[in-house]
Amino acid sequence: MLKNSLDTAFDAGGKVSVGLTATTIVSQWTWAATLLYSCVVASKYGISGPFWYAAGATIQILLFAMVSVQLKIRAPGAKTFLQVIRARYGATTHKVFVVYALATNIIVTANSMTGR
């Protein structure tokens, strides 16, 4: 029996199907800013705008899926990219990327709140 912990909550103790993994990848790439910009593209170019916007993002999603499979093979215990960075590059680089991740989330939140 697995202990209840944050790591267990991330991936259900390692018992996650391929379909759920695919859903997770799509939901992580669908930020509020992406949905907002998709609406902007729709208002400018009509119904085909969001379609082509999503088609362009498909390449990124497919590449990210391949990278995530390789990370799962090479770093099976890591649940976040920050854990991978800490294991590979050390604590100093980990702290730098924590700041970058926080700054990215602040920028996305500000963009979503201002509608830009």
Image: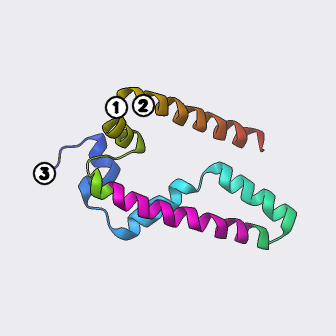
> Which dot marks residue 90?
1
Disc 2 from disc 1: Cα separation:
6 Å
Residue at the (58%, 56%) spot, across then down: 30
Label 1 Cα neighbours within 10 Å, binned few <14 / some 14-19 / many ≥20: few
Q: Quadrant of residue 21?
A: bottom left
Q: Which mark is residue 1?
A: 3
Q: Nearer the viewer, residue 42 or 82?
A: 82
- Taking the magenta stretch, the answer to whether it contains residue 67 is yes
Q: Position of residue 76 (x, y in %)?
A: 26, 52
Which disc number belongs to residue 93?
2
Q: Residue type at mark 1: give it.
A: Gly
Look at label 2 and name its amino acid. Thr
Alpha carbon separation for disc pair 3 and 1: 32 Å
With 14 as the anchor, is 71 left or right in this view?
A: right
Tell me whether the residue at label 2 lies in contact with that at label 1, contact meaning CB atoms closer than 8 angstroms: yes
In the image, residue 74 sits, relative to residue 100, either above or below, namely: below
User: Which contiguous range is marked in magenta?
Assistant: 50-71
Q: Secondary structure at mark 2?
A: helix
Look at the image and say whether residue 70 sits in the magenta stretch.
yes
Which element carries disc 1, helix, strand or loop? loop
Q: Which residue is found at the position 72% from the left and 40% from the top? A: 111
